Image: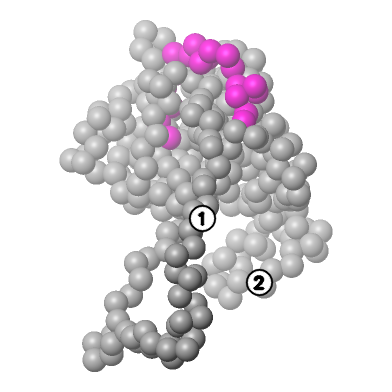
Amino acid sequence: MEEEMLATGAAGPREEEEEGHTAPTSVSAPMEDSEGCEGLWELPVELSERRPECSRCGRPQKVCLCPFLPVHPLKVSTCLYIIQHPAEESRVLRTVPLLAACLPEDKCKVLIGRRFSEDRYPELATVCKNSNTLILYPGAGATNLEEININSSDPCVIIIIDGTWSQAKDIFFKNSLFRIPKQVELKTSLSSQYVIRTQPTNTCLSTLECAAVALAIMEKNESIKETVLRPLQALCSFQLQHGAQVHHSKEHLLKNGLYDKPMPKNKRKLRRMELLVNNVKI
C-alpha cells in the first residue's frame, strides 16, 4: 500500500483580520497616470481554460489512459470499499480513479473522509459487521489474505484505506468501525510500479496495486492483476516521458546515503528511519 495508501493535508481557512486592524485601502493614482491607463481597463481579459479531461479515466485528453483500460469493466464478485483521505482527492496523480475505471460501479465504492461513525455511515457500518468483510491493513494481528477462507455463497468485501501511511494509520485507529472486520495483509514479492511517487519502503504498494493483487487472489484469476496494473504502468510511462523522475523508496534512499532532506527532529520519526535502515519491519 502506497505512500498513498497505507497515500493526504488540506490548507486551513484564511485567518480573519485581527481585531483593531483594518485591511489596507486602495490608493488612487494621480490623474495624469490614470488618464494614460484609461484604455487598459477596456481590454478583454483572457481566462485560462482548464484542459479538457476524459470522462472515464479523468486524465487530460492528450494523455488519456482509456486505451490501457479494459474495454468493459471486469466481472468480479468481490466488492471494494476505498476509504479515501480528503487530501488524496486533490492530488493530480491518483490511482483510485484508474482502479474505479476498471471495475463496475457497484464493485468499487469510494468514501471520502477522516471519521466514519455508524450514525453517519449506516451502510458502511452494516458492511463492516458482515462476516465476509475484510480490511486490508498490515500489522501484527493481520492474516495473509491468501490464507483466508470466505463463504462462497456471499460476495466478499475488502476495505482499503487510501492515503499516506500516517493518514491511513490515523483513519484505521480512530474509527472503531474499521476494527470490526477481519484484518488482512498481502504477502507478495511484487515491487511497486508506481515509480513517480515516493514510497516509505521497498515493499509498499499503491492503492491500485493493493487492489489488483487482492482481487486476483479473491477471484482466483491472475489476469485481473495484469489488467488493473496496465493503466498505472501507462501513467508512469507518460509522466517519465514528460520530465518526471523515478522515485526510489525512502528506505532505498536512506540505505544508500541518497536521502537529501533534513532528518526529522521528532524522536519517533527519527526512530522509524533508523528501523528502515536496519531492515526492521515497521
Q: Secondary structure at mark 1?
A: loop
- Percent x, y of residue 138: 52, 41
Image quarter of the N terminus: top right
Label 1 or label 2, whichever comes before in sequence order: 1
Point 49% across, 11% down: residue: 75
Asked whether residue 202 appears in the rendered view, the answer is no
Magenta segment includes 111 = no
What is the secondary structure assignment of the residue under circle 2? loop
Going 66% across and 71% down the picture, which residue do you hit? 263
- Image color mode: one colour
Decide: is 268 above or below 46.
Answer: below
Task: Using residue 269 as the reference point, say whether residue 8 is left or right of it.
Answer: left
The three-letter amino acid code for the residue at tag 1 is Glu
- The foreground one among 176 and 230 is 230
Q: Which mark is residue 46?
A: 1
- Residue 26 is situated, as x and y percent measured from the top left of the image, at 37, 84
Query: Which mark, by number, is residue 263?
Result: 2
Expressed as whole percent of the image width and height from the top left, the position of residue 256 reads: 81, 59
Where's residue 141, x and y in %?
Answer: 47, 40
Q: Point out the stretch of residues depicted in magenta.
A: 64-82
> Could you classify mark 2 by the number of other residues whose Cα lies within 10 Å: few (under 14), some (14-19), or many (20 or more)?
few
Q: Main secondary structure of the magenta part?
A: loop
